[in-house]
């Protein structure tokens, strides 16, 4: 339609110009004068047609390329989603398998540990006590906190830390230089579970616990007026460690704190050769329905 209208418009314009020029001059036009103008119209029409055709083909090529790129991106995205879905399915299957094992293994282990405890209690009471603490550590690690709205008793958390310290002390014939100080009343106070234990495990993993002059100190201070708990660890760093720390445990606890407490916590990590200190301040709850 555009080409046809343009063609007729060019003929009309040239013919009008031809008539006007013809009426204002005393000379007669040659017979082919109008034909020349007619051919000129076709010439300009062809130029416009070629230009518009080129523009249309170029845009079509660009559009096709964009569509191909979009299709490729969509295919890659679909492939990535399929891979992620497959990975999630595998993880779900693995989790289900782990859950089934967890249902069977603890019961078996508890019975086995109780059997070992009863057999060693009379002859080797220290070994029996270690077995009992190991059983309590395992039992607490598998506690279902859903019944208390995802919160743990502060007293149970402290007991769990005490068991971990004692069992490690027994392993090293009570030569470890480590102290646990609890200041304040821990009764009827609730916190998110398994936060403090990560800092304690960090002490055992990276600390030099054989130095009499630099014992590791673990402190838990309950401030009733502020309704906060300050938990801190201080230890000399073990220079004999072959593998450097990846700080993965500290990164995990910081991520958990952000999810659980938003901005209502303080985690301060300091390392001044050779002493490593960590201080965590969090609020506590008076009951698990808060």
Image (tube, rainbow, N blue to C red):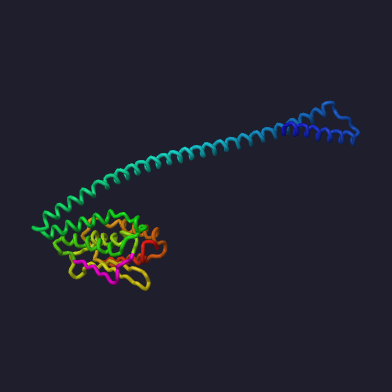
**Between residues 100 and 261, which one lies in front from this camera angle?**
100
| In the rendered image, the vertical position of residue 88 relative to residue 170, given as above or below | above
Seen from this angle, which residue lies furthest bottom?
A: 225
Specify whether residue 187 is painted magenta: yes
Question: Is residue 139 found left or right of 84 in the rendered image?
Answer: left
Question: Is residue 140 found left or right of 36 in the rendered image?
Answer: left
| In the rendered image, the vertical position of residue 39 relative to residue 196, given as above or below | above
Q: Which residues are magenta?
A: 177-189
| In the rendered image, the vertical position of residue 272 relative to residue 129, given as above or below | below
Q: x and y percent of residue 156 in the render?
A: 27, 62
Specify whether residue 254 is painted magenta: no
- For the point 26% across and 45% down, which residue is it? 101
**Between residues 264 and 191, which one lies in front from this camera angle?**
191
**Between residues 198 and 274, which one lies in front from this camera angle?**
198
- For the point 28% across and 60% down, which residue is it? 197
- For the point 67% across and 33% down, which residue is it? 50
Question: Is residue 213 found left or right of 227 in the rendered image?
Answer: left
Q: x and y percent of residue 91 in the render?
A: 34, 44
Q: x and y percent of residue 96 in the render?
A: 32, 44
- For the point 15% across and 64% down, which residue is it? 175
Which of the 4 image quarters holds residue 245? bottom left
**Between residues 250 and 34, which one lies in front from this camera angle?**
250
Name the quarter where the N terminus is drawn: top right
Name the quarter where the C terminus is drawn: bottom left
Q: x and y percent of residue 199 in the render?
A: 29, 62
Seen from this angle, which residue lies furthest right?
A: 26
Number of numbered discs visible in the structure rendering? 0
Seen from this angle, which residue lies furthest left?
A: 123
């Amino acid at each position: 339609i555009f080409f046809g209208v343009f063609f007729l418009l060019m003929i009309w314009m040239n013919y009008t110009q031809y008539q006007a020029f013809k009426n204002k001059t005393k000379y007669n036009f040659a017979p082919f004068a109008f034909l020349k103008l007619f051919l000129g119209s076709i010439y300009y029409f062809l130029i416009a047609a070629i230009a518009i055709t080129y523009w249309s083909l170029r845009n079509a090529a660009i559009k096709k390329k964009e569509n191909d790129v979009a299709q490729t991106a969509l295919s890659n995205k679909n492939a990535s989603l399929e891979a992620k879905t497959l990975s999630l399915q595998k993880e779900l299957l693995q989790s289900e398998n782990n859950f089934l094992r967890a249902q069977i293994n603890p019961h078996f282990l508890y019975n086995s540990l109780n059997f070992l405890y009863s057999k060693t209690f009379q002859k080797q009471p220290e070994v029996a006590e270690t077995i009992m603490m190991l059983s309590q550590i395992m039992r607490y690690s598998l506690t279902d906190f859903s019944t208390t709205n995802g919160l743990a008793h502060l007293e149970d958390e402290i007991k769990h830390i005490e068991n971990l310290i004692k069992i490690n002390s027994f392993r090293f014939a009570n030569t470890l230089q480590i102290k646990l100080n609890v200041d304040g009343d821990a009764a009827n106070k609730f916190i998110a579970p398994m936060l403090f234990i990560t800092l304690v495990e960090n002490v055992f993993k990276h600390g030099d616990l054989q130095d009499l002059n630099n014992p590791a100190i673990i402190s838990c201070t309950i401030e009733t007026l502020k309704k906060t708990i300050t938990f801190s660890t201080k230890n000399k760093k073990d220079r004999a460690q072959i593998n450097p720390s990846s700080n993965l445990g500290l990164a995990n606890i910081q991520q958990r704190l952000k999810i659980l407490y938003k901005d209502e916590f303080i985690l301060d990590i300091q390392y001044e050769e050779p002493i490593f200190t960590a201080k965590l301040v969090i609020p506590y709850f008076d009951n698990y329905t808060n």
